[in-house]
Image (tube, grey):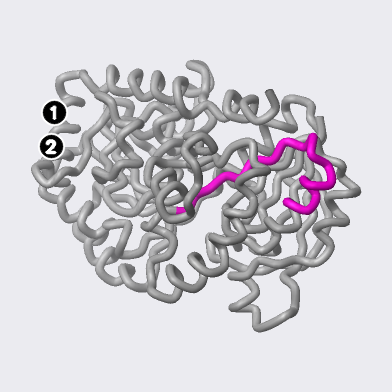
Amino acid sequence: MKILHCCLSCFYIDNYNYQENMLVREHVRAGHEVLVLASTENYDSQGHLTYGTPECYRGSDGAEVVRLPYRKLGPHALMKKIRAYPGVYQQLCAAKPDVIIFHGACAWELLTILRYKKNYPLVKLYVDSHEDFNNSARSFVSKNILHRLFYRPIFKKSIPYLEKVLCISIETMDFVSGFYGCPADKIEYFPLGGSIFDDAAHAENRKTTREKYCIPKDTLVFLQSGKFDAKKKLAEALRAFQKMPRVDSIQYLISGVLQDDVKAEVEVLLAKDDRIRFLGWKSAQELMQLLCAADVYVQPGSQSATLQNSICCRCAVIVDDVPSHHPFVKSNGWMLRDTTSLEQAFRAAILAFQEERLAQMHMQSLHISRELLDYEKMAQRLTS
């Protein structure tokens, strides 16, 4: 089967474990012929957004990747919002896909995909949506001009031609239904997922990674990762952790990069507690190994796909109480409701570790991942 992943409304980054990478990887692994059409957006070695050059190459996930530039119809800042590219229809005609997955519901080029679908109606077309009011339509201009007057009319034209709109969260389902006007029968829950290690691979990752960072076997490890700005609440988490009893059997690992708005404050907190270790930016593979080595993944602030990866790696979790997290926290962690503070969650995790209940929570995370988050099964849903 020929499958086309259109990453023209979002980025496609080689050597990462984002949804786009994982679905492409699984489709290649299943023997399909896979093409990725992508923008030139990329990350540098420190996780900062950059723009490369248009090119065609074999990507890290095993598919052919064609990177297209934005059309030069205006300034770059405007064109990266409009998301129009040259030559998309020609690429479609050359590829002759059986299935098209258009990642992200907001782009001019969705009109080009619709033109192709009308000419070749047997093609299956999916749009996956990551948009919600946490990450989209947040300002007056964004909501009332960019989304209401530009993205939404394009999206609504596509609805009759779509198999499904694949929504990554409950909040995205609400956004697509309520703000974009998508009928309920076109919406399907399609959460961000991850790769699930078997027992032997998980044990090996855990052992070698703990040895690499000199973490004793009987140590409770908390882990927080990401591109840390104020919304990630890293400083708040560190202050709460520093109130825990100062014992050697607890460590707090941090993987990522500090943004300017939190860097000074976090560096002061790091210097106060030798149980906290800042490891810097890690590759996707290294982060997965760290997740296997950790016991509790901490995400008190804004949402990140690493949460789902942590559950696939059998971590218990401490997360913010938002609707999108509810399907993933079922007796395998703590949600930070008004009555549950970060400090209380840390104490509860430490008690679970001391009472040897944490292993049961790890197995519950594994169960949830197999039920909801297995990218192999999710990729198969798009080709069946």
Q: CB atoms at circles 2 and 1 under 8 Å apart?
A: yes
Image location (x, y in percent) of residue 288: 49, 37
In which quadrant will I find the N terminus?
Answer: top right
Hey, what amino acid is under mark 2? Arg
Residue that carries the numbered disc 2 in the rendered image? 347
Q: Identify the residue shown where x is 64% and y is 25%.
A: 380
In which quadrant will I find the C terminus?
Answer: top right
In this rendering, position of residue 243 left or right of residue 293: left
- Residue 127 counted in the magenta span: yes
Image location (x, y in percent) of residue 207: 44, 26
- Extent of the magenta region: 114-131
Front-most of residues 366 and 109: 109
Image location (x, y in percent) of residue 38: 71, 56
Residue that carries the numbered disc 1 in the rendered image? 351
Front-most of residues 171 and 266: 171
Task: Identify the image quadrant of residue 332.
Answer: top left
Q: Identify the residue shown where x is 45% and y is 21%.
A: 371
Quick check: 322 above or below 238? above
Hey, what amino acid is under mark 1? Leu
